[in-house]
Each structure stands twice: as structure tokens, then as C-alpha cells.
Image (cartoon, rainbow, N blue to C red):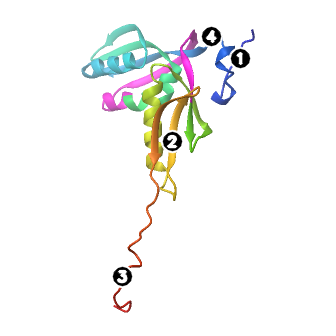
Amino acid sequence: GTELEIHNPVDMPDVVKIAEIQEPWIEATILTPDEYLGSVLKLCQDRRGAQKELTYVGSRAMVKYDLPLNEVVFDFYDRLKSVSKGYASFDYHLTDYKPADLVKMQILVNAEPVDALSMLVHRTRAEGRGRAMVEKMKELIPPHMFQIPIQAAIGGKVIARETVRALRKDVTAKCYGGDITR
């Protein structure tokens, strides 16, 4: 077979044609005050990370972690600043590519796939990421005269769904029988 480098989930070939998917991994170096070390380590573990090194530099801890780039790009830096109250610093460099169980998640609005919202996610994270995405879109899409289904799907299987409710017609608006000059 051939080896492809995918930059856009739309370019992903059919699942039956894929022998292996590899994702980029990084080596992250995080400096944090030691009182926030526990929450920083938990954050890295939750993001499928593998700890490489932990050293202390005075009252600060320096942690080196191997992390998938996919987990870091999404909202890792914001979360890191949040759990460390802004005191942690973060630096990384690309190390290599490792095999991963990635799937292409599509967002369908009114049963039509929206290519710009497609993403490659790890299979274990797909449902949570899909649910968060459709809930956010439900908030952002204004109500129309008809209901709009928003779905997150992997292949043909819907993993999360929300519906933007239809506007209701105000039937009592013209029913006032009094004098219109008042």
C-alpha cells in the first residue's frame, strides 16, 4: 500500500483501505510550582500522556511528558493554565509518529455533513468530543421555522445528537379584541 500524510480529515480514505493510522507525538516540558504538580500530572494522564521525567528545580517541578499532539492542540494549554492558576509554563517539540486508534468524526447539520467541522479523534474520546461539539452548536444555531438536527457521526453511526427546536408561531398575537388605539 501507499503511505499518506493527511492534513485535513476530509482527505481521509475509506476505513477499509486503511492498514494503520499514526499520529504525531510531542515531548512536552512543563515547569510548575510544586503545589500544582498533582493537578498538572492528572491533566497529562487524562490526555493519554506518558511521564518520562520529573525533577525539582527549587520550589518548582519540571515534568517531561510524551503526549499525542491531537490532545494538546484542542485545549491543553488553557487547561494547564487553569489548573496551575497561570503559573505553569509549557514547551514542546515533535518527536515521532505512533500508531493510534483514530477515527474520523463528522458533524451533520440537517443530515448534511459539514466538512469544515470534521475531525480526527481517538476512539475513546469520540463520544465526549462529539457530544460537546453538538451541544455547543445547538447554542450557536438560532431557531428556524423548522427543527434542525445536529449529529456527530463516525462512519454511518451517530454517536451524539441535539436538535435546534423550531420557532413557535405566536397565534395569540392578533387575537386582542380591544381598541387598537389604546
Q: Out of 104 and 180, give the one closest to the viewer.
A: 180
Mark 4 or mark 1, earlier in chain: 1
- Segment tinted magenta in the rendering: 80-105
Q: In this view, does 10 lie to the left or right of 126?
A: right
Of labels 4 and 1, the one closer to you:
4
Residue designated by label 2: 150
Mark 3 or mark 2, earlier in chain: 2
Secondary structure type for disc 2: strand
Label annotation for residue 176: 3
Residue 103 place in picture, x, y as percent = 56, 21
Contact (Cβ within 8 Å) of mark 4 with mark 1: no
Mark 1 Cα within 10 Å, few/some/many (few <14, many 20+)?
Answer: few
Mark 1 or mark 2, earlier in chain: 1
- Label tally: 4
Q: Give the spatial CA distance, label 3 vs label 2.
A: 38 Å
The three-letter amino acid code for the residue at tag 2 is: Ile
Of labels 4 and 3, the one closer to you:
3
Contact (Cβ within 8 Å) of mark 4 with mark 3: no
Q: Give the spatial CA distance, label 4 vs label 1.
A: 11 Å
129 up-or-down from 33: above or below = below
Q: Give the spatial CA distance, label 3 vs label 1.
A: 67 Å
Label annotation for residue 101: none
Residue designated by label 1: 4
Mark 3 or mark 1, earlier in chain: 1
